Image (spheres, helix red, strand yellow):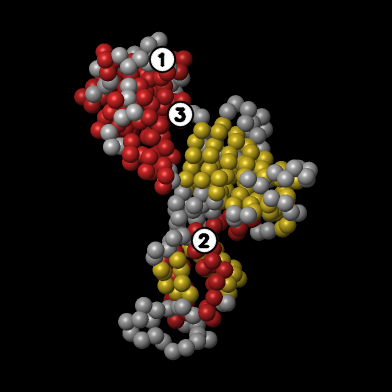
Amino acid sequence: MNPTSEPPSATIRQAIEWHQRLKQGELEPTTQRELNAWLQSRANVEELARICLLDTLLGRDSLKKISLDSLPENVVPFELYAPAPSRVSAVPTRRMLPRLTAKVAIAAGLVLSVIVAAIISLASTDRVIVTREGRWDKQLLEDGSVVYAGPRTKLHFHFDDELRAVTLVRGEALFEVAHQPERPFIVSTEVGSVQAIGTSFATTDLGDRVVVTVAEGKVAVTSAAGVQPILPVHANQRVVLSAAGAGLPEPVNAERAVKWIRNWYEYDGERVGEIVAELNRRHATKVVVDDPQVARLRMNALSFRPSQPEDFVAQINRWYLDFPQKSGPHKAAGDRRSHGVLHLQRS
């Protein structure tokens, strides 16, 4: 069906759904193409713009205070909303918005009520966090928990009165879980799940395995293989999950291990090559080591934000100027590597 011929109810619903998906983070390439095709209709563009404006004016905090039961009796489900011509004129114009924002808690018109109800419904069920390469995110969840998402991460959330369910689709995340024993907090992956009541732990998806690191408290790890009992993992321990099952907990300096996900790191004895490998795993912009000797050197008391690899490169290059055992002559003037042994290669 041609998008311009769809009934108003379908256009409104689609605009709200696209608005929510855009607010949730980066779109996948396929989804972005779908959005571009949908925006070829001027009516769709105008409806999406109106939803964005309404959301800005009303504010999410205001919307969360409005329950479906408190809305006017003229609110009807989308599937029952008939595309009658008379109702098309009920769609609020931009000149009406200032008056509508003051009256949204009471009867603000049929279509506006439907929009508010739909936004509330979408905002209160599932939630998605998506980060791109080289981007970190930190968000406060509705239960008071805090989630830190590292680069290339995708998380799905579904909270209800009995369960706080999270799915780690890819990437890495640190969870500071609010203490609510009656509502278990469970993070699921393809190779197993992690349950916590009130604790701080990180999950890192490395493709063929998932690493669970506990910073505070205790978690219960369950393998998707179904051949092992529930495995308790305590603070300063980590366990590796794979398709074959869960390994035994092993000691780890959890505070330092989870700093990557907090977008901060302090090194104490790691090799430059190891640091570069961790940075390149999270960035499209790559750090290149021009002198192989430097990759084997260990660094002490070095701190920087992983989201700023140029700061790391600058620190190493400044340090190398005074390194007494540096190899080879200085590069010629004008050489991009003349001032150090690392450089950034941007994609």
| Mark 1 element type | helix
Name the quadrant containing residue 237.
Answer: bottom right
Give the residue drawn at x 51%, y 49%.
153
Q: For the residue marked with disc 3, what is the amino acid? A: Leu
For residue 102, say whether it is visible. no
Residue corresponding to mark 2: 281
Residue 219 point in image, percent of width and height: 69, 44
Q: Amino acid at mark 2?
A: Arg
Q: Does residue 236 appear to the left or right of 338 in the view shown? A: right
Q: Is tag 2's residue or tag 3's residue first in the polypeptide sequence?
A: 3
Q: Quadrant of residue 159?
A: top right
Q: Along the polypeptide, which appears first: circle 1 or circle 3?
A: 1
Q: Which residue carries the number 3 mark?
A: 122
From the viewer's perspective, is the residue at label 2 or at label 1 nearer?
1
Q: Position of residue 70 (x, y in %)?
A: 44, 15
Tell me which numbered mark, 2 or 1, is placed earlier along the sequence.
1
Q: Residue at x 46, y 19 (%)?
A: 67
Q: Secondary structure at mark 3?
A: helix
The residue type indicated by label 1 comes to Leu
Neighbour tally class for label 3: few under 14, some 14-19, many 20 plus, Cα within 10 Å: some
Q: Relative to the observer, which residue lies in front, 10 or 3?
A: 3
> Regarding mark 2 in the picture, which secondary structure is present there?
helix
Instruction: Give x and y (percent) for residue 74.
Output: 37, 11
Residue found 41% across the figure and 34% down from its top: 20
Q: Is residue 282 above or below residue 111?
A: below
